[in-house]
Amino acid sequence: MSHLTPDQVLATPAGEIAQKSSESLFQLKNNAADLLSAAKAIVEHIDRALDLKYADHTHALRLAAGRDTGVVHFDDGHVRITAELPKRVEWDQQRLAEIVGRIADGGENPTEYVDISYRVSETKFNAWPAMLKESFAKARTVKPGKASYRLALVQENPA
């Protein structure tokens, strides 16, 4: 089972794979991780090459359109190229808090202008005294995430 091609693995029902030995599952999982790692490295390498080939042209197209970011389209031979340079906006949280405070002090509702979100670090929450935890407990919901499994070969003890 561990020597199956990726297509063969995908064609095998998960229930059948689940019946395999832990050693086979270990090998399948490691083979898949290796393939994924290699595929990501290849995609990144090709993306670097595409950026080297088209960065100047896409930059010129964006400048001509009066933009620094966004999507541009052009043809290179028989290939339609769509290049996207996303906009990444970051907000200074301290300054936003000050602005929100001024809006509230002025009698307006800051949520008309700003999305406000609260988060509590689970590490901090677990370090709090019981009385403080109790105050926040009603606002806290714990949901399970996606299960994941790591497999490692255990070295057998020599007999």
Image (cartoon, rainbow, N blue to C red):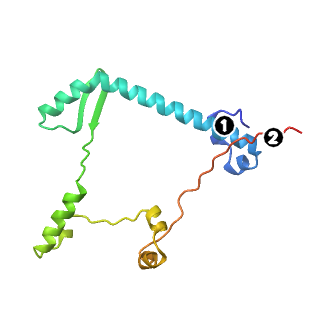
Quarter of the N terminus within the rendering: top right
**Mark closer to the chain start, 2 or 1:** 1
Residue 142: x %, y % from top left: 50, 68
Residue at label 1? Answer: 8
Q: Secondary structure at mark 2?
A: loop
Q: Can you say whether 55 is above or below 24 in the image? A: above
Residue extending farthest front: 129
Q: Identify which amino acid the numbered label 2 is placed on.
A: Glu
Crowd rating for badge 2 (residues with CA inside 10 Å; few <14, some 14–19, many 20+):
few
Crowd rating for badge 1 (residues with CA inside 10 Å; few <14, some 14–19, many 20+):
few
Name the residue at 47% across, 28% down.
42
Residue extending farthest right: 159
Could you say which quadrant of the image residue 95 lies in? bottom left
Real-space CA distance between mark 2 and mark 1, rounded to the nearest whole angstrom: 30 Å
Q: Secondary structure at mark 1?
A: helix
Q: Is residue 102 left or right of residue 135?
A: left
Residue 151: x %, y % from top left: 67, 45
Residue 103: x %, y % from top left: 13, 69
Q: Identify which amino acid the numbered label 1 is placed on.
A: Gln
Q: Can you say whether 130 is above or below 4 in the image? A: below
Pointers 2 and 1 in contact (C-beta within 8 Å): no
Name the residue at 25% across, 57% down.
93
The front one of 2 and 131 is: 131
Residue at label 2? Answer: 156
Could you say which quadrant of the image residue 136 lies in? bottom left
Front disc: 2 or 1 = 2
Could you say which quadrant of the image residue 72 lies in? top left
The front one of 8 and 139 is: 139
